[in-house]
Amino acid sequence: MLFAFLCTDKPGHLNVRMDTRPAHLEHLNKLNADGTLKMAGPFLDDEGKPNGSLVIVEAEDVAAARALAEADPYYQAGLFETVDVKPYNWVFNKPEA
């Protein structure tokens, strides 16, 4: 089952995002190599600076998905103000379809 992580950065935490980015990318690369990661990328503010994240993963259930979200170095560094984990149904332009 697919799950979307809708993550909103804490205001004024761009430095935390940038400092933690290498570890975050390493984490996502591992999920990608395992076939767990389906897509990911940052949300951008009006100036084009990242201010949140969208990550879509495959997991057995919401508990497993939440564990993946909480294992992200961004999460562990305290970057996010909120992290919503929601079941997701990829309908259009799904690569396997």
Image (tube, rainbow, N blue to C red):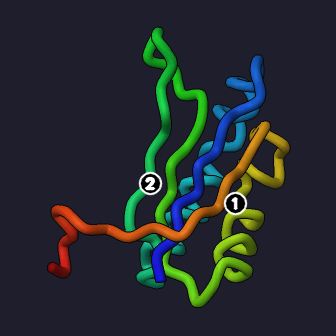
| Residue at the extreme bottom of the image, as rendered | 60
Between 22 and 57, the one nearer to me in the picture: 57
Sequence order check: which comes first, mark 2 or mark 1?
2
Which residue is at 43% across, 78% downward? 33
Judge by depth and name the residue closer to the eye, 66 or 28.
66
Could you tell me residue 42's position as x and y percent?
A: 49, 39
- The residue at 47%/26% (across/down) is 44
Determine whether 57 is above or below 61 in the image.
above
Q: Quadrant of residue 62?
A: bottom right
Q: Residue at x 19, y 80 (%)?
A: 96
Instruction: Find the residue positioned furthest to the top.
Output: 47
State left or right for residue 59 relative to residue 64: left
Tell me the residue that label 2 is attached to.
40
Give yes or no for contact between labels 2 and 1 (Cβ–Cβ under 8 Å): no
Mark 2: secondary structure: strand
Amino acid at the residue labelled 1: Asp
Toward which corner of the image does residue 52 lie, by quadrant? top right
The image shows residue 94 at horizontal and vertical percentages of: 21, 69
Quadrant in the rendering for residue 78: top right
Give the Cα separation between the discs numbered 2 and 1.
12 Å
The quadrant of the image that shows the C terminus is: bottom left
What's under tag 2, amino acid-wise? Ala
Above or below: residue 66 compared with residue 8: below
Kindly identify which residue carries mark 1: 72
